[in-house]
Amino acid sequence: MSPPDRPTSRAGGGGPGSRRPRREVAVLALLLAAFAWVGHGLVVETLRWREAIAVGAAGGDPAGGVVAGWQLGDPGPRRLERFLGVLEHYLPPDARVAVVAPGKPPSEEHFLALWTAYLLPRQRVLPRAGGLDAPGDADYLISWELPVDDPRLVEVLRHPDGGLYRVER
């Protein structure tokens, strides 16, 4: 007769020793899933980085690629920060500001507005819908890269990276 704490047969899977391999398999499966998740994130970030470089090389934005792909420390945000640092001296505190990027898709304008809100915390950056046709409640309009010609706007400052305009009502 065998001792009571030792299983007589592992083939049936009913003894106390049969749980240990299942637990090890579960831990191994969780570890593999974690490694796959990390690997997937690495691949996605690498592809975003390569796309931003390719767009920049193709003439999209030579200083930083696609705005949606910008990250802190990239050339695009550094260039925008320098530009907004100049404009900040011309904006009163708590001014309502809209951002446009002529020639860029609306999604790029959206991300540019988010970056502007982050980099100009003393201003109220407003979401815009409708492009230049709807400056909305903004007191000022910031144009990225290209100047804007609109009779409702008074140019405050022209800069190589864009311009600052006061909205006339």
Image: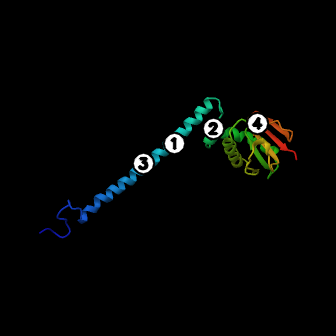
Specify the amino acid type for callout 1.
Val
Identify residue for label 3. 35
Q: Residues within 10 Å of mark 4 (few under 14, many from 20)?
A: many
Vertical arrangement, residue 108 with respect to residue 58, above or below = below
Tell me residue 39's x, y (percent): 45, 44
Tell me residue 95's x, y (percent): 80, 50
Secondary structure beneath disc 4? strand
Quarter of the image where the N terminus is located: bottom left
Identify residue for label 2. 66
Vertical arrangement, residue 30 with respect to residue 112, above or below = below
* Mark closer to the observer (3, 2): 2
Residue 7 or 76: which is nearer the viewer? 7
Secondary structure beneath disc 1? helix
Q: Residues within 10 Å of mark 1 (few under 14, many from 20)?
A: few
Residue drawn where x is 39% and y is 52% of the image: 31
Identify residue for label 4. 162
* Mark closer to the observer (4, 1): 1
User: Which quadrant would residue 27 be assigned to in this image?
Assistant: bottom left
Residue drawn where x is 80% and y is 40% of the image: 164
Measured Cα–Cα span from mark 4 to mark 3:
44 Å
Measured Cα–Cα span from mark 3 to mark 2:
29 Å
The first of marks 4 and 3 along the sequence is: 3
